[in-house]
Image: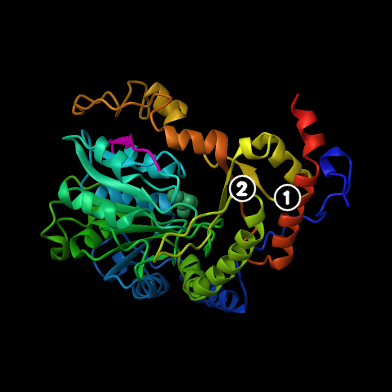
Amino acid sequence: MKEKLALLGGNPVRRNSYSVHTTMIDSSEEEEVLAVLRSGHLSGFSARPGERFLGGPNVRRLEKDFAEYFGVDYAISFNSATSGLHSAISAAQIGPGDEVIVPPTTMSATASCVLMQNAIPVFADIEDETFGLDPDSVEAAITPYTKAILTVNLFGHPSRLEELKSIADRHNLLLIEDNAQSPGAKCDGRLAGTFGEMGVQSLNYHKTIQTGEGGVVLTNSKRTAEHLHLVRNHGEVVVGHSDQYSDIDLTNLLGWNYRLSEIQAAIGIHQLRKLDGLNELRIRLADLLSEELRDYDFLASPIVRPNCSHVYYLYPLRFFRERIGISREIFVKAMIAEGISISQGYVRPIYLEPMYQKRIAYGTRGCPFRCPWYKGMTSYETGLCPTAERLHFQEIIVTDICKYPNTKKEVEEFVYAVQKISHNLFELRKLED
Ligand SMILES: *Cc1c(COP(=O)(O)O)cnc(C)c1O
């Protein structure tokens, strides 16, 4: 039996749109938020030396809970992962003239947080297995100006953290993890986000757990934690008035307002308790999808490395055109016509964006790229990271169906749509001509 594709006028596999309630919010968050509203203290922060410099009761509770969950000494909350990343670069004492190695396949803030500190992002390539930084490419990108490696645990799988840590140690660099997409993922029993000097979590509304907007930076270093506290809350007005921070050279430490509100923190406390359950659901759905897609050799399911876990922030597939004889574009178009949530590519390698191509960030004079303190020469040419370019422009397909509140039904629809397509290849090939 052969069913007509929706793309060619047939009935779609799925007619309804997907639920927008993709995080579990229930009475626990509602009651906690009401309590904050009724208390009148919507934020507990004050940019002055003293107790309130570190925020109100919910912010502190959230931080304590995150530190406990991740098994680290300090968790510092921020109003986004982007502000957390920027603060992490500041806390790593990175500034003009310095380079930070980053992957090109990630959300833009992973690279722009380096520019925010007037330092230079240097792109190393990613690898096919984890879609994270390729250790050999990282090693080749190290220069006398390199200060840190900022790795991303992409799509829910840890990058090669052990190898990257050992490269960082060997070259006396800091390893920082952008763990926005992989809270709860593990390698060798250890949680992603805890391998580096700092690990940055996101609580924005796209992520596995959310507070609308928010972020948390994890660290085991007291000095780093203090620096993060200062950067978050106008540190420059506290320095010199408090002996709490006397052993940090802070005369030139710029702070911002990167504070989380009490309402957001109240939500985050309950969201964290749901993380493991939400991840288990993602894993269950993703495992089912991988199992069901085994018969289709033109699609490669995500790899889970030995002793690691994947928490499937997104479910990435690699598409092999030569094995099916239609383009990725037509395949994705046909899937979308069937009502399936799917897209081709992830993000264009970041160095191809105009800011890098034109080398301007601050003002019109090319800062920080042409900053006189910068003595290096990094490339943003097309072809710089061939694996990242191939994966984005030719192979990667992502779907976000493996998450709350979806069930087996959504996975089966996905597989059914793939099956429909594979029964109609003759018709689809004709569309290519
Ligand atoms: C979402 C995301 C961020 C930014 O998170 P915000 O909380 O929105 O600032 C950074 N890096 C990666 C990899 C992300 O997925």
The magenta region covers 117-126
Do the numbered discs 2 and 1 sit on residues whose CB atoms are within 8 Å? yes
- Answer few, some or many: residues within 10 Å of disc 1's Cα (few below 14, many 20 plus, some between 14 and 19): many
Q: Residue at x 11, y 60 (%)?
A: 246
Q: Quadrant of the C terminus?
A: top right
In the foreground, 74 or 13: 13
Residue denoted by label 1: 418
Query: Is residue 118 part of the magenta span, yes or no?
Result: yes
Dominant SS of magenta comes to loop
Secondary element at tag 2? strand
Where is residue 390? Give x, y as percent: 50, 34
Q: Which mark is residue 299?
A: 2
Q: Residue at x 33, y 23 (%)?
A: 366
Visible residue check, residue 351: yes
First reached walking from the N terminus: tag 2 or tag 1: 2
Where is residue 41? Give x, y as percent: 46, 71
**Residue type beneath disc 2:** Leu
Spatial CA span between label 2 and label 1: 10 Å
Q: Residue at x 39, y 68 (%)?
A: 44
Farthest-out residue, left: 247
Where is residue 140? Give x, y as percent: 25, 36
